[in-house]
Amino acid sequence: MTAPVTRSFIDHLPKAELHLHIEGTLEPDLKLKLAQRNHIDIGQTTIEEVQQTYRFNDLASFLAVYYPAMNVLQTEQDFYDLAMDYLQRAASNHVRHVEIFFDPQAHTSRGIPFKTVITGLHRATVDARALNVDAALIMCFLRDFSKESARQTLEEALPYKDWIVGIGLDSDEHNNPPLKFARQYEDAQAAGLHITAHCDIDQKDSIEHIRQALELMGVERIDHGTNIVEDPDLVAYAAKQGIGLTCCPLSNSLVSPHMKGEEIVELMGKGVKVCVNSDDPAYFSGYINDNYEALASQYQLTQEQVAQLARNSFEVSWISRQQKDLYLSEIDRYLAQAQ
């Protein structure tokens, strides 16, 4: 008989997190602390009042809350504190490796220098080693900004490319297909950076955007992307090419009552390297282990299935083969002890 998947099993399972927006980890208490430190009037004076503002019912209303909240991030220390707050939570969730999204245009567009943002975040990734967490940064282009803005952002980033593992694409997907940024992606690849892109769930032209990202731009991973099940040919392609899909059950609940759980399980069964992540945990009330638990509980996953999700997270991460094998061995030992 297969042992049940308990919260304790999930909590101690070694895992990687590959779909985490650092700006989406801004918890109400930290937002209030930074507002007070930087003398910014955010219109709220208690944690409870801040919590009341974290309400939305679709992607557009979420972004309308999400971006203004970033105004409290002003200094290098603010970005360091934001990242360290998350990394300490990641360590408690037994995240061994994390690749963190950040959105420089959301900050440079309001007058915060690129250097301020990346220096604070990088310093936190270095200090995270003391927490036994290996951390890297993925710089995202905001797809509702112009191609020229993306070009300028990449130009600013290249002097810091040793601090950045890859390039991503996020924000409002409507009328902003992946191909809009094909040139910037080619330039990023030429500079030696990995590439991924958001293909959000249930968007207009979802399958076409997934096809562009996979077949035309050659991304190594797709963030979200579970609409791929609508095209069996693309599913087969993703499985054959070892494409990672970084899925986020709790944030999926914003637009899908079933978290896209059926699709995640189906894709896993077809050999696609899907993994579980937390997206914007401060806004969706759950960090990575909460996402694992929600999916495992609602879809009665076995320990082996949950372990496979964790294996996939390392397999599609941007670390060396040797590092992957070390982490995979750690999962094998853990699973052997748990059964």
Image (cartoon, helix red, strand yellow):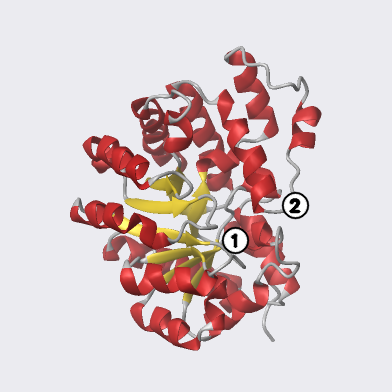
How packed mark 2 is, by other alpha carbons closer than 10 Å (few <14, some 14-19, many 20 or more), is few
Residue at image coords 67%, 38%: 65
Q: Is residue 209 above or below residue 51?
A: below
**What x and y, as percent, mark residue 184?**
29, 52
In the picture, measured across the screen, residue 180 lies left or right of residue 277, that is left
How packed mark 1 is, by other alpha carbons closer than 10 Å (few <14, some 14-19, many 20 or more), is many
First in sequence: mark 2 vs mark 1: 2
**What x and y, as percent, mark residue 229?**
55, 81
Q: Is residue 118 above or below residue 250?
A: above
Residue at image coords 30%, 43%: 151
Q: Nearer the viewer, residue 130 or 229?
A: 229
Please give the residue where the numbered disc 1 appears in the rendered image.
Answer: 248
| Residue, far left | 190
Q: Quadrant of the image for the C terminus? A: bottom right
Q: Nearer the viewer, residue 179 or 261?
A: 179
Three-letter code, disc 2: Asn
Three-letter code, disc 1: Cys
In the picture, measured across the screen, residue 30 lies left or right of residue 233, that is right
| Foreground: disc 2 or disc 1 | 2
In the picture, measured across the screen, residue 38 lies left or right of residue 178, that is right
- The image quadrant of residue 150 is top left
Q: Nearer the viewer, residue 294 or 113?
A: 113
Element under disc 1: loop
User: Is residue 29 among the parts visible in the rendering?
Assistant: yes
Q: Which mark is residue 23?
A: none
Q: Quadrant of the image for the N terminus? A: bottom right
Please give the residue where the numbered disc 2 appears in the rendered image.
Answer: 57
